[in-house]
């Protein structure tokens, strides 16, 4: 009657050493089996750091907290006129986003600053019209950005930060405060 072999975890060092030559003499598995085994345990595809950050980025919608064109005009003299520059301030995730829209001929400059935790990142200004240009730029060391030569239209701005994607509600670039589209 053959006794079943002891489990490897119960062998002494001497018993284990005695079994090594017998194990080394065993034939290798066929090459096709080896390939199948390696294919089953293939390492995951290489992921770039940017792809990994995108996978864990939390999307947050910012809230408009100030619009210079939505404010009632202050008592002003007859010579005073409203500013063509529009200031918008949005809040999200402990940050304030100060946005300025300044006319530049028949185009506009959209600039701003992210105020809050120090983050590096980028800004993307996407038009509602899918075929129009998407404007992108990185944030500088002070969290500032500037997008020049922006065509009039309705846009949505996204801040792509380390752990968050902060999305601002759509707003108009080029509308006047008096045409009913100041949003």
Image (cartoon, grey):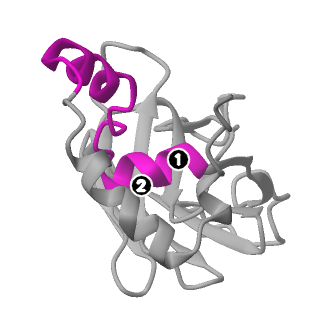
Nearer to the camera, 121 or 39: 39
Q: Residue at left 38%, top 69%?
A: 17
Residue 144 appears at what percent x and percent y? Answer: 41, 75
Nearer to the camera, 72 or 170: 170
Residue 180 appears at what percent x and percent y? Answer: 72, 28
How crowded is the residue under tag 2: few (<14 C-alpha within 10 Å), some, or many (20+)?
Answer: many
Tell me the magenta residue range: 29-56
Residue 5 appears at what percent x and percent y? Answer: 61, 44
Q: Is residue 129 left or right of residue 47?
A: right
Residue 48 appears at what percent x and percent y? Answer: 30, 50
Q: Which mark is residue 158?
A: 1
Q: Residue at left 26%, top 16%?
A: 33
Residue 113 against residue 127 in the figure, above or below:
below
Looking at the rendering, which quadrant does residue 65 occupy?
Answer: bottom right
Dots 2, 1 in contact, CB < 8 A: yes
Query: Which of disc 1 and disc 2 is earlier in sequence?
Result: 2
Q: Residue at left 60%, top 66%?
A: 11
107 part of magenta stretch = no
Q: Which mark is residue 123?
A: 2
Residue 172 against residue 36 in the figure, above or below:
below
33 part of magenta stretch = yes
């Amino acid at each position: 009657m053959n006794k079943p072999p002891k489990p490897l975890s119960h062998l002494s060092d001497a018993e284990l050493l005695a079994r090594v030559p017998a194990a080394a003499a065993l034939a290798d598995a066929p090459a096709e089996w080896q390939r199948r085994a390696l294919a089953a345990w293939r390492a995951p595809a290489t992921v770039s750091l940017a792809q990994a950050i995108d996978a864990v980025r939390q999307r947050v919608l910012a809230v408009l907290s100030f619009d210079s064109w939505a404010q009632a005009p202050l008592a002003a003299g007859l010579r005073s006129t409203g500013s063509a520059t529009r200031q918008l301030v949005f809040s999200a995730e402990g940050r304030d986003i100060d946005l300025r829209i300044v006319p530049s001929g028949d185009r506009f400059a959209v600039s701003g600053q992210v105020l809050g935790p120090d983050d590096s990142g980028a800004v993307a200004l996407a038009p509602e019209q899918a075929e129009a240009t998407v404007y992108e730029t990185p944030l500088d060391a002070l969290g500032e950005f500037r997008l020049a030569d922006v065509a009039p239209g309705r846009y949505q701005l996204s801040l792509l930060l380390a752990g968050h994607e902060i999305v601002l509600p759509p707003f108009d670039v080029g509308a006047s405060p008096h045409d009913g589209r100041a949003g």
